[in-house]
Amino acid sequence: MGVAHISNPSEPPSRTWSRRGLLAVLGIAPAAALTGCSGSADASQGAVRTTPKAAAKKPAISVTPADGTRKAAFSSPVEVTVTDGTLASVKVTGNDGSTLAGSLNAARTRWTSTANPYSGTKYTVSATPEGGAAETSTFTTQSPGETFVGYFTHEADSTSGVGMPVSINFTHAVADRAAVEKAITVTAEPAVEVVGHWFGDTRLDFRPETYWAAGTKITLSLRLKDVEGADGVYGTQSKDVTFHIGREQISTVDLAAKEMVVKRDGATYATYPVSGGDSAHTTWSGIMVISERFKQTRMESSTVGLGDEYDISDVPHAQRLTTSGTFVHGNYWAPTAVFGHENTSHGCVGLHDAKGADDSSVAGYKFYSSSMLGDVVVVRNSGERTVEPDNGLNGWNLSWAQWKKGSAL
């Protein structure tokens, strides 16, 4: 302030003011005091304030069809989704013991079944989010109003000849042939291409290009359950069936020579004199497959449109070649001299036989004993046209190109 000393007459001349005293007189706080007060003020202004964190959201799982649904559609896949989290696992189990496989999206927030659920089935869905507990829901699919099945040859686990196709007859006309054919596969060991061919809207046959190899194992896989074959009509089968092919036996009937040559695995096995259809009742020509076998059976002409020309109650060793009534069978009523010399039948191929079907020395007995379902019988020089491929199991009369055109795929 420029004042170093102040005289005061009332005080001794020797007293002087200190710096602290002077500052006090002037109303200025000492530096030490200012410094001391600033400590508490700075601590208050520098304190860190924190905001409480929001509670983490719990993953929310949603299942389609919804929990408790009683008549869920079976035409769409099952879907499980999660929000505010990811899925660790999903399991869908039917009350029939089946399970539905599925896959997660890249974000693991949605699981979708790879196939649709089956009809008329109760399902339990167990979905587990990451870090959480499993959640369970149930639903039941509706039952279809109308159904169809396919009856097939061969018989399961049976052994047949090399000409036996896999033939399936449906109980309801099929409108969507592609959907039904896609649901059926036929595989062979050793492997060979097998293709389906439709004969009308109720029959689907499968065969390779040439006869099955001897010893082939065939597997028919039916995945028809819930396949819509026609409007509102669904299949019911989901099963695998195995068949086997035995030795190769191909018999060739030459009705000009009136002789049948039987070859087993490529070598001549037997030769028999035969009698075929006469000029008024010619025998079908072409490739035919044995589709039924009877030690004895009744044959009536009325069943094949020939009135009352014959009715034989005990025809021995009869083996069916066509649906229309062609058989290769034993004949005990014609003279022995007929066989190998005359064609006198109403269209069947006859071999000499004995009444009662128990004489093992005759040709009818021998040929029957050496045969099995699926064996091939080729008829030549009969004077008749080639048999229709759907008249029996006789699709071998179609070329491979013709056969493949009959597929819906």
Image (cartoon, grey):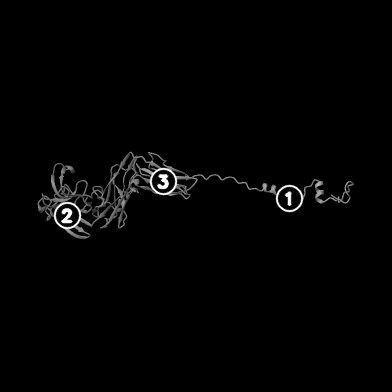
User: Is residue 349 visible to us here?
Assistant: no
- Distance of mark 2 from mark 1, alpha carbons? 125 Å
Left or right of 160 in this view: 2? right
Instruction: Please report the residue visible at 43 percent of the width from the left and 43 percent of the height from the top.
Output: 63
In terms of depth relative to the viewer, which is nearer, 28 or 182? 28
The residue tagged 2 is 369
Q: Tell me which numbered mark, 2 or 3, is placed earlier along the sequence.
A: 3
The residue tagged 3 is 126
Tag count? 3
Amino acid at pointer 2? Ser
- Residue density around tag 2, few if under 14, some if 14–19, many if 20 or more, within 10 Å: few
Q: Percent from the top left, x then y, of residue 49?
A: 62, 46
Label 1 sits on a secondary structure element that is: helix
- Distance of mark 3 from mark 1, alpha carbons? 70 Å
Residue 54 quadrant: top right
- Distance of mark 2 from mark 3, alpha carbons? 59 Å
Q: Residue furthest bottom?
A: 267
Q: Percent from the top left, x then y, of residue 68?
A: 40, 39
Amino acid at pointer 1? Thr
Q: Tell me which numbered mark, 2 or 1, is placed earlier along the sequence.
A: 1
- Residue density around tag 3, few if under 14, some if 14–19, many if 20 or more, within 10 Å: some
The residue tagged 1 is 35
In terms of depth relative to the viewer, which is nearer, 355 or 347? 355
Label 2 sits on a secondary structure element that is: helix
Q: Percent from the top left, x then y, of residue 351?
A: 14, 53
User: Is residue 147 visible to us here?
Assistant: yes
Q: Nearer the viewer, mark 3 or mark 1?
A: 1
Left or right of 335 in this view: 285? right
- Does the residue at mark 2 contact the one at mark 1 (Cβ under 8 Å)? no
Q: Percent from the top left, x then y, of residue 14?
A: 88, 51
Amino acid at pointer 3? Ser
